[in-house]
């Protein structure tokens, strides 16, 4: 038995699978295969692998018994680590291999294929002409059924959903080793971890545009099952984890779930989970979260504080609590049944700042809120954009910190209330959308970046991931990593510390820390904080410098702290803020 998995990448309200992330879909599928067919060969490709060597993929797929395509971007974004599969690729590639059974899974099969924000999605039934099975239920259990039925498609229910997490507990553990085939393995690979499925707000219908309530009642995953999977991933070589596959981490094992819209956070359950992860993955590099419902914090401020303090106790710094504010217009909040009114969202941002704004060992604050805006919702008017800006200006005036602001146009999906509304508000407000986005970048993002990483801040543990002209692009493995431009072409996947020297709207400029004074080019030396053109000339004339005293004599002690004689970071923990 040979099974090929093509990971076209996924991005959902709860779940991310664009590199450096690997989502649960390929891992669960691989685990299902190895559970049903112990000796099966599972070959994993990313869509970027296929683009680089298309012939190798087609050759391998043509010899396979089963090819599983995973696709679906529900909340489109801009990605540095990879480019999700396009609609053209998704309908062209399956028909090039006659032999294997072809299955489509992921959000594209369950909810539809989102092309980009502001456009209607392609419904799942569109893909039935190209695939033998469009997995409208849970992909991994459908693949398991296919294998049990010796690939007889007619005997498999494409709508079947798992009963509960016990059905896939073994899949999650056995499938962990597929990560060794990921191109980011042993670099900055981040495993997305699932803690529960469904949105607690399904009892009131949830947000008008969101697919999460469509899963129905919330089903929690047992702590021990999560820890078994994390331990398997850790033993396979993964060192970075994100508890991102849930709409609100504060709702994990929350009291009143499936009874009330905003269940009460359960700090004890979160402590058991986070402490357990630290126990089974003792030398992890990253442990982050994703979604936090601002309404949960606003309705249960004290319990939310306790829960957030537990997270900060066990996680790694640079973490982000992504909040679906969606709109600061109360009329839009009401029309779309959004999570929180503006004052509630603002209070939630204050509380996260109160708990998480202190700076951590990697140079970034421990835990900051992130804000998501969705444009094109019902009830939106020109005043909506003004109210959104006023909301952000209040954050600035209060001196609060926000790690990032995501602004996207709604992507209506079948089965949501926005599907019948479509994109008419998007079309009506295109000019206002562009103006709003530009204003936020100039007036809010730029100012906020200067607060979060002031000039001279040292950020630790970044990986070089890409190039842009003569610049290297580096990021920490993180939930929402800050992009750093380095004015040097460093080897790909170099891991380094950097010192921040300048700020853009969504990214910053940095230098390797400490910078090797004997090998750095003139243009890099000129960017060192506190250095003058005369000092740069003196350094170049004195190279190679052998003694630190000589370096200090030329540039002074304050500037010398950014420089070294050999480029090896010093052992002592310099903190430059």
Image (cartoon, rainbow, N blue to C red):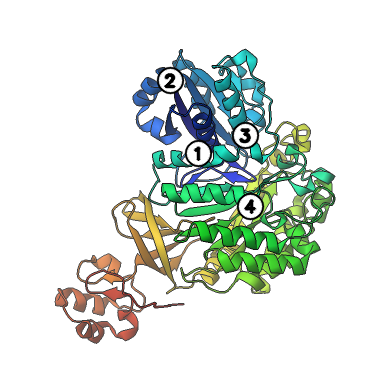
Q: Identify the residue at horizontal 78%, vertical 45% (top origin).
A: 206
Q: Position of residue 246 (x, y in %)?
A: 66, 48
**Circle 2 crowding by C-alpha within 10 Å: few under 14, some 14–19, many from 20:** many
User: Disc 2 or disc 4, which is closer to the eye?
Assistant: 4
Pointer 2 residue: 64
- Answer with mark 3 or mark 2, whichever residue precedes in sequence: 2
Residue 174, disc:
1
Q: Is residue 326 left or right of residue 574?
A: right
**Circle 1 crowding by C-alpha within 10 Å: few under 14, some 14–19, many from 20:** many
Badge 3 vs badge 2, beta-carbon distance below 8 Å = no
* Image quarter hosting the N terminus: top left
User: Disc 3 or disc 2, which is closer to the eye?
Assistant: 2
Residue 223, disc:
4
- Answer with mark 2 or mark 4, whichever residue precedes in sequence: 2
Query: Marks 3 and 1, how far apart in space?
Result: 23 Å
Residue 107, disc:
3
Q: Nearer the viewer, residue 137 or 473?
A: 137
- Answer with mark 3 or mark 1, whichever residue precedes in sequence: 3
Q: Position of residue 247 (x, y in %)?
A: 68, 49
């Amino acid at each position: 038995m040979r099974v090929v998995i093509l990971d076209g990448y996924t991005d959902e309200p709860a779940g991310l699978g664009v590199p450096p992330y690997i989502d649960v879909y390929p891992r669960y599928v691989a685990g299902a295969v190895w559970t049903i067919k112990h000796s099966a060969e599972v070959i994993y490709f990313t869509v970027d692998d296929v683009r680089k060597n298309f012939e190798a993929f087609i050759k391998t797929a043509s010899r396979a018994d089963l090819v599983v395509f995973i696709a679906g971007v529900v909340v489109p974004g801009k990605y540095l680590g990879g480019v999700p599969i396009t609609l053209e690729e998704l309908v062209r590639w399956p028909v090039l291999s006659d032999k294997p059974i072809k299955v489509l899974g992921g959000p594209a099969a369950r909810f539809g294929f989102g092309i980009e924000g502001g456009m209607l999605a392609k419904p799942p039934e569109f893909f039935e002409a190209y695939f033998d099975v469009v997995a409208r239920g849970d992909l991994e259990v459908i693949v398991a059924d296919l294998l049990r039925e010796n690939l007889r498609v007619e005997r498999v229910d494409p709508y079947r959903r798992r009963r509960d997490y016990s059905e896939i507990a073994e899949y999650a553990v056995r499938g962990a080793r597929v990560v060794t085939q990921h191109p980011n393995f042993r670099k900055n690979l981040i495993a997305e971890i699932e803690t529960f499925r469904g949105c607690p707000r399904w009892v009131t219908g949830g947000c008008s545009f969101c697919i999460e309530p469509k899963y129905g009642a919330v089903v929690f995953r047992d702590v021990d099952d999560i820890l078994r999977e994390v331990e398997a991933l850790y033993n396979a070589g993964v060192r970075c984890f994100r508890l991102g596959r849930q709409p609100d981490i504060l709702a994990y094992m929350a009291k009143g779930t499936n009874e009330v819209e905003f269940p009460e956070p359960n700090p004890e359950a979160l402590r058991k989970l986070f402490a357990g992860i630290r126990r089974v993955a003792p030398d992890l590099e990253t442990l982050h979260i994703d979604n936090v419902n601002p309404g949960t914090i606003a309705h249960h401020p004290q319990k939310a504080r306790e829960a957030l303090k537990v997270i900060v106790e066990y996680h790694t710094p640079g973490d982000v609590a992504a909040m679906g504010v969606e709109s600061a217009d109360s009329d839009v909040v009401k029309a779309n049944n959004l999570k929180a009114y503006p004052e509630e969202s603002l209070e939630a941002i204050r509380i996260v700042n109160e708990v998480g704004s202190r700076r951590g060992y990697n140079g970034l604050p421990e835990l900051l809120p992130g804000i998501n805006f969705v444009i094109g919702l019902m009830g939106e008017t020109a005043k909506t954009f003004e109210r959104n800006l006023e909301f952000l200006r209040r954050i600035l005036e209060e001196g609060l910190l926000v790690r990032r602001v995501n602004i996207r146009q709604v992507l209506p999906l079948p089965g949501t209330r926005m599907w019948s509304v479509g994109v008419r508000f998007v079309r009506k407000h295109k000019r206002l959308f562009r103006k709003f986005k530009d204003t936020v970048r100039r007036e809010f993002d730029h100012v906020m970046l200067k607060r979060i990483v002031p000039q001279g801040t040292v950020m630790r543990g970044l990986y070089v991931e890409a190039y842009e002209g003569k610049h290297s692009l580096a990021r920490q493995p993180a939930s929402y990593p800050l992009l750093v431009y380095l004015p040097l072409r460093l080897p790909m996947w170099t891991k380094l510390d950097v010192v921040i020297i300048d700020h853009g709207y969504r990214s910053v400029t940095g230098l390797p820390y400490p910078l090797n004074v004997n090998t750095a080019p003139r243009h890099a030396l000129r960017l060192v904080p506190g250095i003058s053109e005369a000092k740069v000339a003196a350094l170049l004339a004195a190279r190679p410098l052998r003694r630190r005293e000589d370096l200090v004599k030329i540039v002074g002690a304050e500037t010398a702290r950014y420089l070294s004689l050999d480029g090896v970071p010093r052992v002592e923990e310099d903190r430059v803020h």
